[in-house]
Image (spheres, helix red, strand yellow):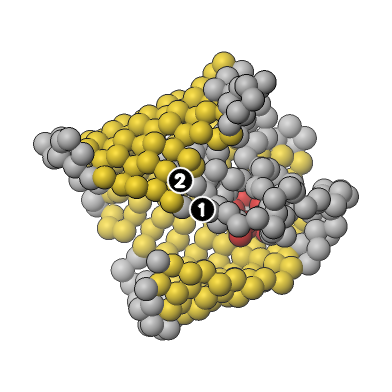
Amino acid sequence: PFFNIITFISKKFNLEEDIATPPGATDIVLDLAYVKVSDFLAPGLTITAGRQEIQLGEGLVIGSRYNVKDYPYDIGATDLGILKAFDAIRIDYAPSALPMNLTLFGAKITENPTGTTPDSNLIGADIGLKLADVVNMDIYFIREAADDINTIGGRIVAGLPAVEGLSLKAEYAKQSQESTGWALLAGMEYKMSAAMEPVIKVNYARFTEDYEDVYPSNIDSRIGPVLYATGLYGQKDLQSVNLGFGFSPIEKVGISIDGYWGRVISDKQNLGIEVDLGVDWKYTEDLTLGVTGGKIFGRTGTLVANDPWQVIVYGKVAF
């Protein structure tokens, strides 16, 4: 079990349109409720049925039932959205004799009991391979039937034995049928064994103008939490670069600094630069306290030209 208590203060984004409270915003929503059976009929075969989280790869295509464009409740800062689960049946198979795993799932997104419009269903498959002790690869296929969009993608994560603590990753997804767009993620992280445990990371993301979001994970780590929270830019027609640095000045305290640069591809318009600072204090094994803040230095003439900022104070309790 896990609780996440969050308080945030933010400058208004000065959007031109007010966000209306969607129907059912005062309802109680069940996020997770599933049954999981391990070693069903055969060793290594697991079946999970019910409302569950599903993420493939880096979450480039599948990671959250709700994202910035269709989150069902007005929570003010969409980067704080935590609902992710799908109503789905999932089968996982990991044979002990082979360095691989297979995932198959089918999810019901929306259902129309009257039959006047088709249901929205999602199906997917993922094959994971461990090519060496430091190389992992995934190949996946996703079909969103209602929009007639097929997406095939691949992801690789690799370390370099000669450089301890260095990790490289890349993921690419290509669409067909009603969309011909593509998306790319690439990055590296280097955890040094020096004093204060410094970490350096670089990430690049690009999404073509005709790329259609399926159900990606929250993308604040790709374009910046504050920029994502505005709800103005999603995973489409965008490229961004993230440069981050972290260290631990004293035991149980971690500090992170991240910079983001974003650009709308079709308009050839730079959105500006976002700078974020975070501090985590692991007070006990069960309690973590922290604060994180970010500010966009927006470009004149863009929708973030008013330089929005956000400060979040949080506590995490596990038991």
Residue for badge 1:
31
SS for dot 2: strand
Residue 73 image point, x, y percent: 68, 52
On the question of residue 169 being in view, the answer is yes
Identified by mark 2, the residue type is Arg
Q: Residue at x 74, y 48 (%)?
A: 22
* Mark 2 → mark 1, Cα distance in angstroms: 7 Å
| Image vertical order of residue 139 relative to residue 170, above or below | above
Residue for badge 2:
51
Q: Which residue is drawn at 43% across and 31% down?
A: 106
Give yes or no for contact between labels 2 and 1 (Cβ–Cβ under 8 Å).
yes
**Residue at the outermost front position:** 114
Front residue of this view, candidates 91 and 156? 91
Residue 267 image point, x, y percent: 77, 35
Identified by mark 1, the residue type is Asp
Picture quadrant where residue 182 is located: top right
Q: Which residue is drawn at 34% across and 47% down?
A: 35
Residue 286 image point, x, y percent: 38, 77
Tally of numbered tags: 2
